[in-house]
Image: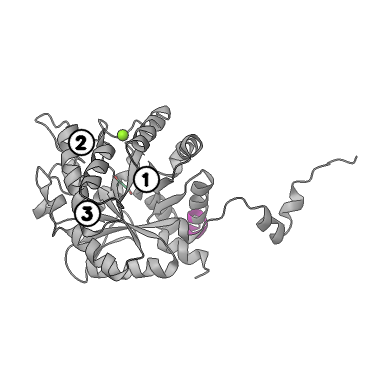
Amino acid sequence: MSFPAVRMRRMRRDAFSRALMREHTLLASDLIMVAFVIEGAGQRQPVPSMPGVDRVSIDELLKLAGECVRLGIPALALFPSPDASVKTEDAREAWNPQGLMQRATRELKAKYPELGLIGDVALDPYTTHGQDGLIDEHGYVVNEPTVEALIKMSLAQAEAGMDFVAPSDMMDGRIGAIRDALEEAGYIHTRILAYSAKYASAFYGPFRDAVGSAANLGKGNKHTYQMDIGNSDEALREIELDISEGADAVMVKPGLPYLDIVRRVKDSFGVPTFVYQVSGEYAMIKAAAQNGWLDERGVVLESLTAMKRAGADAILTYFAIDAARWLRGE
Ligand SMILES: NCC(=O)CCC(=O)O
Ligand SMILES: [Mg+2]
């Protein structure tokens, strides 16, 4: 037998055989667009640390939603950037039936009923201190009172027609408590996307600028509720708990630096596993691309494909619309 018996390059030689042996292909239907909502009309406010991402008023959000529908992007994740004037210590604006998220949800569902909506459930856009929960006199985020607030927030979103409530706060027991409250109120179809393995990451910086919590949080951090970046087994325990409490899908966050976690979660539980390509990942790619140091299209599609290869069923990304356009050759 002549050397080499196996030529790996044979299958790579032509486009047709490369296509036939390709294991994972990124589709628009894998993507979830992320949007920041603000008050007003005709408003588009750039987020300086996220070039290309604007905070938009509801009328502009409807245009963005229409583009998602046209491109076959199945869902839109909404984050509010409310006026500073409605922020309080107790975050009560979060469950105002006429609040920004609730109004945005009603208008989006009226115009595009087929587009899935994912509502963030955490108090940070609404608190004067920028923490995801309620705090005691020492600044410690208190678990059970926060869960009570998150229940009110989830019910307000469900009432407005939100398809998925997505608790991103990392309190203990909140998935079960929200699930019970939704069932009891008759919202049996409202899905829960649990941010189960959310790490205390430095990659969230630009997001905090976008929702306006960065200045309020100041030198504070979220280490008493978000996960330590050095841990992996702990992520599996968090995921297992959220599944047992009634989560319909679980999430790992951030994305690219945490694909080992995505793979472990998918292999261990086989549940719908989402991953979030966060603001800092977006900013890194954009900054390098703007300097001419990286090819944006290539790097974005490669990063998203890597997430799918790692086991993600869906990817939340600020690049969703761009990526879906590129996938169609637009
Ligand atoms: N709950 C959302 C975040 O905490 C941050 C997301 C991001 O950095 O894109
Ligand atoms: Mg947990």
Q: CA distance from mark 2 to mark 1?
A: 32 Å
Q: Name the foreground residue: 11 vs 173.
A: 173
The yes-or-no answer for disc 2 within 8 Å of ligand 1 is no
Whether residue 17 is visible: yes
Residue at the image position 20 percent from the left and 61 percent from the top: 38
Estimate the spatial distance between the alpha carbons at disc 1 and disc 3, rounded to whole Å.
17 Å
Residue at numbered disc 3: 157
**Main structural element of the magenta stretch: helix, strand or loop?**
helix
> Type of residue at label 2?
Gly
| C-alpha gap between disc 3 and disc 2 | 28 Å
Which quarter of the figure has residue 231? top left
Indicate the amino acid at tag 3.
Gln
Label placed on residue 148:
none
Q: Crowding near pointer 2: few (<14 within 10 Å), some, many (20+)?
A: few
Pointer 2 or 1: first along the chain: 2
Q: Give coordinates of residue 85: x percent, y percent.
A: 9, 54
The crowding category of the residue bearing disc 1, from other C-alpha atoms within 10 Å (few below 14, some 14 to 19, many at least 20), is some
Closest to the observer, 33 or 117: 117
Residue 129 appears left or right of 63: left
Q: Does the stretch in magenta take in 90?
A: no
Image: magenta residue range: 295-300
Q: Which residue is mark 1?
A: 248
- The residue that mark 2 highlights is 220
Quarter of image, res 244 = top left
Question: In this picture, is 41 found above or below 3?
Answer: below
Determine if residue 293 is in view. no
Q: Which callout, 2 or 1, points to the residue nearer the camera? A: 1
Q: For the residue marked with disc 1, what is the amino acid?
A: Asp
* Mark 3 or 2: the one toward you: 3
